[in-house]
């Protein structure tokens, strides 16, 4: 580790993995509820399990992004973090706030939670993915501002590399677009319109910059390719992301009451959104092929290549599947969306955070890379989780196609719940594949505790 | 700066064909053209569905303004070519002047376009009037924004040129900016006949 203060990333990474486990457990509960409607009812109703599943995902990815940034920024800026103490304080605040929120979701009815937490002061609750109570939302803002203050100050006093700047733009964008979580107009069209400014402009906008920046950082470290070359790729990826992703928001504006031109704008721009992801795939493979050194941390490189491929498949290809408005007319809100969501989040953001952890954690534990035994185990977890998510995606896609046909496209359409029963087989297969995913995740955790570690290379 | 995306090709042999400008700007240009290509294709399909509406509305467009703008952009491109040629001759003194003349043409284009928009918006035409006007406004407005971006790039180049930054040995940045400006011109040369003239 080049700088002592990089070590603050460690608790962030550990918390991220812990919450990841929670997310997957709730995913399994949800998956079971798809086929056994009253599973764990009334203790954990479906809507609560879904909220916990998605909120935990967002929160652990944020922990991962923050940990990754705290690790990367000092090394890029070539100076110690402005305030490691602030970073640690924010860690505990964020962790406690996050845990309390989840406990709130699970123990109190949502309406009561809203009452208890002052939702009547500013009504922000009740919207998908932004369900957090007001104190949690304010907590997120405080933590994000302190975090941004910390890393921005670090970059300002140190070297300003392109990779660090792209990460800063991504993280500042993340904070700015979160502010739309506080804007909840009565008009439901305007509400939805700006709700997407948080949701879409996060995952198909600024988060992609964070992804690109992390990927570039790990590729520089592991391949030894010239920084100039890697930075040029990063510029191209960032530009492509912004050209396609910003107006691509329009693919959410087809059926919410916005003017008709969004059908065209959304279709045209979002149809090109796979391109930056494809550029990332080519980027990762080209850099690894042109590597000038053999980095001992093979598994970090595997994650880097994996995220390149899976982000393209999940976000790019599966996104394109239903992005054109004439197609989306039929597929909107079906299991096709769920299929895309699972593979895109795993491929783009889960894998890139695991890549950062995989690269940084051994170094923070005093070695260049884990020993053979640990790496092989981690590779097993890579393949188990990745193959599982591929199959989850395929099963959900099959379920989605059937659902569209049975419920919307056939000459004799049947009601939603009747269609759900007919596709239950795919939900069962998805659920068991989810168990395989959990096994992969557990192996991932075990891989931290086996082997002795290779001493500094 | 390294011209290529990979470290393999840093400085090609003198007799090998050389890519003018930076490879990154070419990828950027290709991406931009791809967006427009998809837009043009969508226009073609939409038009094929309702040629009568498209023909009728096309008649309301100001073709003279479009023609003047074509002339302005082509002339602007010519000035930028002169600037690049001057750099290749190492004639540093005139580079900035040619770039400035190119920008002047761009400004003229924007002016004409604003007058044209004012007339259309004044007549109550909007993106929601019908499919033709949706395409007319979207396509010309996206292009309008690209002209503005092109002028921002040219102004950076102009500033550098005045400091004597470009010459035979260093025309990389100038060529990159020029390539982008030519793209803005090229897109208009397709857009103008497609939306204003072809029936």
Image (cartoon, coloured by chain):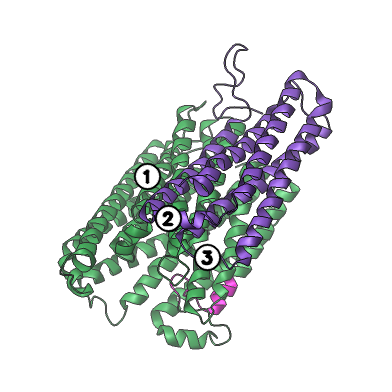
**Residue sitting at the far top:** B15
Q: Nearer the viewer, mark 1 or mark 2?
A: 2
Instruction: Please provide the residue range marked out in magenta.
Output: A127-139
Q: Earlier in the sequence, mark 1 or mark 2?
A: 2
Residue at 31% from the left image edge and 75% from the top image edge = A46
The vertical placement of A363 against B88, above or below, is below
Q: Earlier in the sequence, mark 3 or mark 1?
A: 3
Look at the image and give the colour of chain A. green
Residue on which disc 2 sits: A267
> In the image, residue B58 lies at what x, y percent?
51, 54
Residue on which disc 3 sits: A198
Chain letter behind tag 2: A
Chain letter behind tag 1: A
Q: Nearer the viewer, mark 2 or mark 3?
A: 2
Residue on which disc 1 sits: A378
Callout 1: helix, strand or loop? helix
Whether residue A447 appears in magenta in the rendering, the answer is no
> In the image, residue A61 lies at what x, y percent?
48, 58
Whole-number angstrom distance, CA of label 2 to CA of label 3: 20 Å
Residue at 38% from the left image edge and 53% from the top image edge = A319
Q: Earlier in the sequence, mark 2 or mark 3?
A: 3
Q: Nearer the viewer, residue A106 or B15?
A: B15
Callout 3: helix, strand or loop? helix
Chain letter behind tag 3: A
Q: Residues within 10 Å of mark 2 (few under 14, many from 20)?
A: many
Q: Are discs 3 and 1 located on one and the same chain? A: yes
Whole-number angstrom distance, CA of label 1 to CA of label 2: 39 Å
Residue at 45% from the left image edge and 55% from the top image edge = B54
Residue A290 left/right relative to B110: left
Residue at 69% from the left image edge and 60% from the top image edge = A149
Circles 1 and 2, Cβ within 8 Å, touching? The answer is no
The vertical placement of A65 against A39, above or below, is above
């Amino acid at each position: 580790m080049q700088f002592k203060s990089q070590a603050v990333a460690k608790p962030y990474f550990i918390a991220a993995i812990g919450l990841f486990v929670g997310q997957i457990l709730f995913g399994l509960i949800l998956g079971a509820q798809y086929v056994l409607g009253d599973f764990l009812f009334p203790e954990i109703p479906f809507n609560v399990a879904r909220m916990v599943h998605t909120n935990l995902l967002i929160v652990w990815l944020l922990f991962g992004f923050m940990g990754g940034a705290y690790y990367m920024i000092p090394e890029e800026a070539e100076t110690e973090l402005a305030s490691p103490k602030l970073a640690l304080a924010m860690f505990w605040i964020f962790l406690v706030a996050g845990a309390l929120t989840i406990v709130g979701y699970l123990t109190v009815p949502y309406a009561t939670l809203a009452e208890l937490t002052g939702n009547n002061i500013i009504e922000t609750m009740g919207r998908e993915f932004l369900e957090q109570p007001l104190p949690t939302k304010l907590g997120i803002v405080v933590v994000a501002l302190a975090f941004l203050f910390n890393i921005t100050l670090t970059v300002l006093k140190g070297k300003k590399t392109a990779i660090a700047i792209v990460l800063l733009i991504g993280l500042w964008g993340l904070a700015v677009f979160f502010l739309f979580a506080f804007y909840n107009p009565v008009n439901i069209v305007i509400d939805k319109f700006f709700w997407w400014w948080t949701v879409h402009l996060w995952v198909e906008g600024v988060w992609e910059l964070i992804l690109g920046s992390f990927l570039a950082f790990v590729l520089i470290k592991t391949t030894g390719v010239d920084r100039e070359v890697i930075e040029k790729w990063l510029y191209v990826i960032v530009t492509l992301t912004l050209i396609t992703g910003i107006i691509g928001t329009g693919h959410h504006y087809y059926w919410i009451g916005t003017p008709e031109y969004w059908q065209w704008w959304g279709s045209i721009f979002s149809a090109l959104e796979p391109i930056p992801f494809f550029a990332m795939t080519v980027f990762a493979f080209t850099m690894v092929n042109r590597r000038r050194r053999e980095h001992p941390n093979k598994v970090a490189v595997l994650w880097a290549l994996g995220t390149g491929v899976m982000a393209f498949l999940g976000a790019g290809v599966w996104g394109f599947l239903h992005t054109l408005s004439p197609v989306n007319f039929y597929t909107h809100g079906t299991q096709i969306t769920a299929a895309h969501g699972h593979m895109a989040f795993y491929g783009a953001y889960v894998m890139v955070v695991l890549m950062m952890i995989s690269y940084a954690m051994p170094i923070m534990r005093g070695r260049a890379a884990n020993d053979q035994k640990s790496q092989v185990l981690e590779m097993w977890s890579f393949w188990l989780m990745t193959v599982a998510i591929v199959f989850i995606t395929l099963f959900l896609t099959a379920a989605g196609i059937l659902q569209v046909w049975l419920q919307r496209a056939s000459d004799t359409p049947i009601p939603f719940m009747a269609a759900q029963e007919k596709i239950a087989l795919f939900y069962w297969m998805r659920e068991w594949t989810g168990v395989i995913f959990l096994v992969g995740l557990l192996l991932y955790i075990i891989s931290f505790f086996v082997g002795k570690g290779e001493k500094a290379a | 700066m390294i011209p290529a995306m990979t470290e393999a090709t840093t400085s090609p042999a003198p007799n090998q064909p050389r890519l003018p400008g930076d490879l990154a700007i070419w990828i950027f240009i290709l991406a931009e053209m791809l967006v427009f290509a998809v837009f043009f294709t969508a226009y073609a399909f939409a038009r094929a569905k309702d040629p009568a509406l498209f023909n009728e509305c096309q008649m309301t467009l100001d073709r003279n303004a479009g023609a003047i703008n074509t002339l302005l952009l082509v002339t602007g491109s010519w000035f930028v070519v002169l600037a690049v040629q001057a750099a290749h001759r190492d004639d540093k003194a005139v580079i900035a002047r040619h770039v400035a003349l190119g920008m002047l043409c761009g400004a003229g284009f924007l002016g004409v376009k604003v007058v044209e928009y004012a007339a259309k918006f004044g007549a109550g035409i909007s993106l929601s009037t019908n499919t033709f006007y949706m395409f007319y406004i979207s396509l010309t407005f996206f292009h309008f924004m690209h002209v503005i971006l092109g002028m921002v790039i040219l102004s950076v180049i102009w500033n550098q040129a005045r400091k004597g930054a470009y010459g035979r040995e260093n025309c990389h940045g100038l060529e990159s900016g020029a390539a982008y400006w030519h793209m803005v011109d090229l897109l208009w040369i397709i857009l103008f006949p497609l939306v204003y003239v072809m029936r």
